[in-house]
Image (spheres, rainbow, N blue to C red):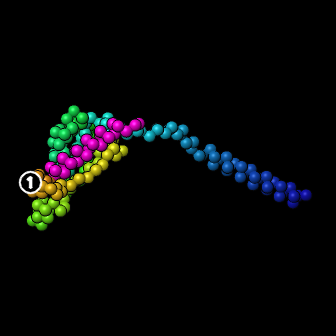
């Protein structure tokens, strides 16, 4: 009986140590702070709600040409502004203008390809949602050398496409 008492005491001691270590481990676990309820995703503004656009700097001075075309074509609809704080949306983009004799002959005079191209994206003010994106070139098949080309023509076409997108967005149901 002494042997069984010794084994029983050993088992009770082992069980007690195990229970004590589990309790100690649980007391050291830091409670996690309550999670914040997730914010519902913000809905981006519709194109027709945009009244002011900040235009970021672009290559080939495309930003300046776009601003000038906006003032001409979108008068009363949308206006370019000088800072992001004043804007409802932000326009970013890239431009390319091929220069040289080969590009001038085949592109400018014959109208076979674009000598200038541009691609833009219109973001909401926080730059989390793309509201509109498009690209344009300066190719002109009919009149070739008699019409203006380069970044000015690209800007004119991009603003015309933006105006069309705004007007189509007005017609679209919510």
Identify which residue, 117 or 64, lies in the foreground: 117
Q: Give me the residue at 24% from left, 36% from top.
A: 78
Position above or below: 43 against 14: above
| Magenta region | 151-174
Occupied quadrant, residue 143: bottom left
Q: Is residue 116 visible?
A: no
Q: Tell me residue 104's x, y (percent).
A: 11, 62
Q: Give me the residue at 54% from left, 38% from top.
A: 34
Q: Quadrant of the N terminus?
A: bottom right
Horizontally, is 155 left or right of 14 in the view? left
The residue wearing badge 1 is 146
Q: Is residue 87 visible?
A: yes
Q: Tell me residue 71's x, y (percent).
A: 17, 38
Occupied quadrant, residue 103: bottom left
Q: Tell me residue 158's x, y (percent).
A: 23, 48
Q: Is residue 145 magenta?
A: no
Identify which residue, 66 or 168, lies in the foreground: 168
């Amino acid at each position: 009986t002494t042997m069984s008492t010794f084994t029983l005491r050993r088992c009770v001691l082992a069980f007690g140590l195990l229970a004590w270590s589990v309790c100690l481990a649980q007391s050291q676990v830091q409670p996690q702070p309550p999670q914040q309820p997730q914010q519902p995703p913000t809905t981006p503004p519709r194109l027709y709600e945009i009244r002011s656009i900040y235009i970021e700097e672009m290559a080939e001075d495309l930003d300046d040409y776009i601003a000038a075309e906006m003032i001409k074509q979108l008068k009363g609809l949308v206006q370019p502004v000088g800072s992001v704080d004043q804007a409802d949306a932000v326009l970013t983009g890239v431009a390319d203008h091929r220069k040289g004799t080969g590009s001038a002959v085949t592109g400018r005079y014959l109208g076979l390809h674009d000598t200038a191209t541009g691609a833009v994206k219109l973001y909401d003010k926080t730059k989390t949602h793309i509201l509109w994106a498009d690209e344009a070139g300066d190719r002109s098949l009919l009149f070739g050398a008699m019409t203006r080309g380069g970044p000015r023509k690209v800007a004119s076409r991009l603003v015309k496409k933006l105006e069309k997108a705004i007007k189509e967005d007005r017609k679209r149901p919510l």
